[in-house]
Each structure stands twice: as structure tokens, then as C-alpha cells.
Image: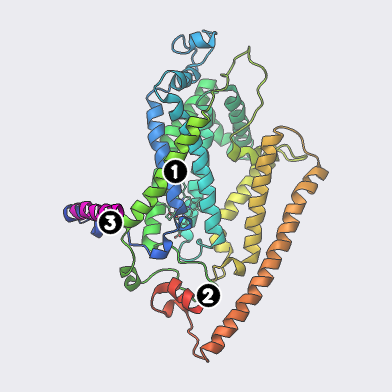
Amino acid sequence: MSFSSWYNRSLNKVWGFVEDRTAMKKWALRPQPEFTFKPSYWTGSFVAVALSYQIISGALLLLYYQPSTNPTLTACGQAVGSLSSAPAAWCSTYYIVNSVPMGQLLLSSHLYGAYAMIFLMFVHFFRGYYVGVYKSPREFSWMVGTLLMVVTMGMGFTGYLLPYTQISYNATNVGVVLALRLPTVGPLLGPFILADGTSQGLLSRMFDAHVILLPIALAGLFYAHFALFESHGIAPPATSDPLQRRRFTEKEEKGHVPFIPHVLLYTMKWGLLYVGILFGIAALWPWNLPTYVGNTAAAAVVTEPDWYFLWVFKLVDFAGVTPVIAIGVTNVLLVYILFLPFLDRSKRTHPRDRPFFIYLATCMLGFLILMTVWGGETPGVQITDPAIAMTLGPIFAVNAVVVALFHYRYHRSYQRRLAARKSAFAGNYPRSVSSRAGGPAAAAEVRGVE
Ligand code: HEM
């Protein structure tokens, strides 16, 4: 017997045993069509895997971390050589890195895991945008997803201050100043963010937000996000058919693959790969703790946030852009994303049928990448008006030409194929893809015009 048949038989036996005793198939998540066994359909699950790792590693870090700005005489004092000034928050982080077994791996993987989660979240967001998953009936899934994005970014912002390094302290203060300058809302936010106005007050608020308030919000939103996904099922492939149904029927679902164990094992396979890569990177390039807040002996430190806030940080360097304008731009972007399902009202989901919204997505992507790289290369360097026009102008212009060309080309080839099909069906052309047996994917294959 070959290894794979032995493996499959053993797995089936174990699974049969568990299923017998739990009747899991009845209460597990809904079955999924076989064509979704591609990473692009499960980008949200990869974000959820990354989130799970953050929860586990964060809970372990909590065993050692002290959210206090008080100088400490223990743990790191000797190594730092300045017993009276190193704050406990920094010292406890120093202790994790240098004295806790595997501590540096734990902290580095938590930090890189946050980067990966945010990166995967952007992949999930842009994939959903391009293939139009926000269209009816998934508008609320999209809106809850947008709120998840805000809370996840908030987790990144609040976590950045916790090691209490000078660089994170400076960057957090920039962010706090931006928030406090907001008209009307700013003064109201003040007491919530700053507490009693001391450094300890700020650290305590960031700590509470990072380990209690935002995780509660994240858990609630994630529950709603997943419950909505469960009730709608996965979005069928993007199509140009305006009559395409956006859900599978009960009959079609009978032919789908059970979530447990198939989809679960599929996502777990990717999840294990994720954790392996994360550990590998954290082991090869461990994070080094920068100097602590108030170290007068240290050379001047550049003020720089983590990469996912660099774009807005760079925006403030533009001539004429005040903190209020920078925050205003961020809010306009967020409101646009939140209400996108109600702005793009066409029934067709295929990117070739939504040139205007695809143009906006591509501009947004180009803008974010460029500003992030720019912010990383020249943080805090003022940018003049001609330099802004010379750098951003080509992105918007080239995008317009590319999207227009693709739209023209795809639209013509779609019309050609549609006409050929119509004549092949000799006037018997079906009104809707979904009316065919086998679901939209099978129908798409038959017609070959999606
Ligand atoms: C912490 C961040 C997020 C997590 C953990 C998350 C998780 C998930 C999961 C597990 C799914 C099920 C399908 C899949 O695995 O792809 C999903 C679907 C979905 N997500 Fe997210 N998501 C997040 C952020 C977002 C954002 C930022 C958006 C958009 C603004 C979004 C919009 C959607 C939509 C529309 C679906 C349904 C897609 C479909 O049916 O194919 N999500 N999400």
C-alpha cells in the first residue's frame, strides 16, 4: 500500500470516529463549492490565521510585559548601564528579548505577524474590490470588513508604543497630535487618549486599547463578518451577466464539499505554512530593540511610524498639507470604501464592466505604494508642489490610459464571444447563467463568455 493511500485511509478512519461522536457535519460551517479550493477565495481566512497567531503570541508576551513608565532597577538596568532612567515598559521588553527562552523569537514573530496580518488584510480588501464581492447581497459584509480594517490599524497604532522606544514614542505623538487637531472630534478625543496628560497616562491608554478595548471590538466585528459570510456563502466568480445570481441554491449546495474537514484542512495547510515562514523570518532576522524613551546618551532618533502608516505620515510633508488635511484625506478614503457598495450600483461584477471604480482602486493602490516607499525613504523631508505633481501625476494619468485600453479591448472581445455564442444557440440563448444546472462556474464554462 502506498503512503498516500495509507494516509488517506487513516485520515478517513480518524475523521469517521470524530464525526460519529460529534455529528459535526450538522453544525459545522456551510459546505463550499470545489472550485473555491484556490488561495484567492480564502484570503480572509489567511487574515484570520494571522489574527489567531497574534492572539496567542500576544497572550504569551503579556506574561512578562509591564505597562509602566516608572524607572526600574531590575532586569535590564545593568545591561543598559543607566539604572535610574530606563522605563519598566522598555525594560520588560528588553527582558523578553534577552532573558526569556525563545523570547526574541516570540516578540519578533508577534511584530512581523502584525505586518503580515495587515498586508494580508490589504490583499483581502483589494481582491474583494477588484472582483466586486461587495455587491448585493454582501454590502454589510463589506461594511463590517471596513470597520475591521480600522480596528486592525488601531491595533497596530496602539501596539507600536508598548515597547516604549524613543522612535515609537515620537511617532505615536505625531499620530496623537493628528487626532487631536481634528475639528470638533479632536478636543473630545483628548481625555480618552491622553488620560491625565502624563506619559504614563498615554501608555496606559494605549495598553488598554491594545489588549482589551480593540480586541473586544475585533472579536465582535469578526463574529458579525463571519456570520454574514456564513449566511450568504462564498461569492461566485465575477461575471458580466447582470442576471447572475449571487448565491447558490440549496440544491447546488448539496453537491458542495463539507467545510469540516475539507475546507478546514485546506486553510490549515496554508496556516501552517504561514506560521513556518513567520518563524523562519523571525529567526533569521530577529527584531532588535531600539533605545528607550528619554535616553539622553543616545543620538537623535528619526521619527517614523510602522510601514502601514508611512503613507499618511508622508502626506504631512507635502507643501500646504496640514495635519487636519491629512486626517481629512484619510477619512474621505475610509468613507468612500465604507459606502462603495452603494456607490457602484451596476449589477455586473466583472472588473471589465466597472472601469471607473477599477480606475479608482488602481489609483488608490498606486498612491498607497508610492507614498509608503517615499515615506520610508525620506521621512520628514518637505515636498514641493512641482515634485508632488511630477510624482503622483503620472500614476493617475498612466492608470487612466491602461484601464481605458483594457476596458475597450475586453469589452470588444466579450461582445464578439457573446455574439458567437448567441448564434450557436440559434436564438435559444439562456437568459441567466444561474438557470443552468451545476451553478455559475459550470455555466460559465459551458458558455465560455465570463
Ligand atoms: C481583520 C480583518 C479581516 C478578517 C479577519 C476577515 C476575514 C474574512 C473571512 C474569514 C472571510 C471568509 C472568506 C475568506 O476566507 O476570504 C471573509 C470574507 C469577506 N470579507 Fe473579510 N476579513 C477582514 C477584513 C475585511 C475587509 C477590510 C473587507 C473589505 C472592506 C472585507 C470584506 C469581506 C467580504 C465582502 C467577504 C465575503 C467574500 C466572499 O464571499 O467571497 N473583509 N473575511
**Can residue 195 be seen from the camera position used here?**
no
Work out whether 200 lies above or below 119.
above
Point out the frontmost of discs 1 and 2: 1
Query: Residue at 51% across / 61% down in the picture?
Result: 134
- The location of residue 292, given as percent across then percent down, is 56, 19
Residue type at mark 1? Answer: Tyr
Relative vertical location of residue 196 with respect to residue 410 in this rendering, above or below: above
Circle 1/circle 3 CB separation < 8 Å: no
Q: Residue furthest front?
A: 1
Residue 133 x/y as whole percent: 50, 61
Range of the magenta residues? 2-19
Frontmost residue, 38 versus 147? 38
Q: Which mark is residue 274?
A: 1
Position of 371 with respect to 351 (left or right) is right
Q: Are marks 1 and 2 in contact (CB under 8 Å)?
A: no
Mark 1 crowdedness (10 Å alpha carbons): few <14, some 14-19, many ≥20: some
- Label 1 sits on a secondary structure element that is helix
Q: Which residue is mark 3?
A: 5
The residues tagged by marks 2 and 3 sit, at their Cα atoms, a distance apart of 45 Å
Q: Nearer the viewer, mark 2 or mark 3?
A: 3
Find the distance from the CA under tag 1 to the CA under tag 2: 38 Å
Q: Return the disc, 1 or 2, that comes first in the chain's sequence.
A: 2
Neighbor class of circle 2 (other Cα within 10 Å; few <14, some 14-19, many 20+) is some
Compared with 51, 18 (above or below) is below
Q: Which amino acid type is marked by label 2?
A: Pro
Residue type, numbered disc 3: Ser
Q: Which residue is mark 2?
A: 242
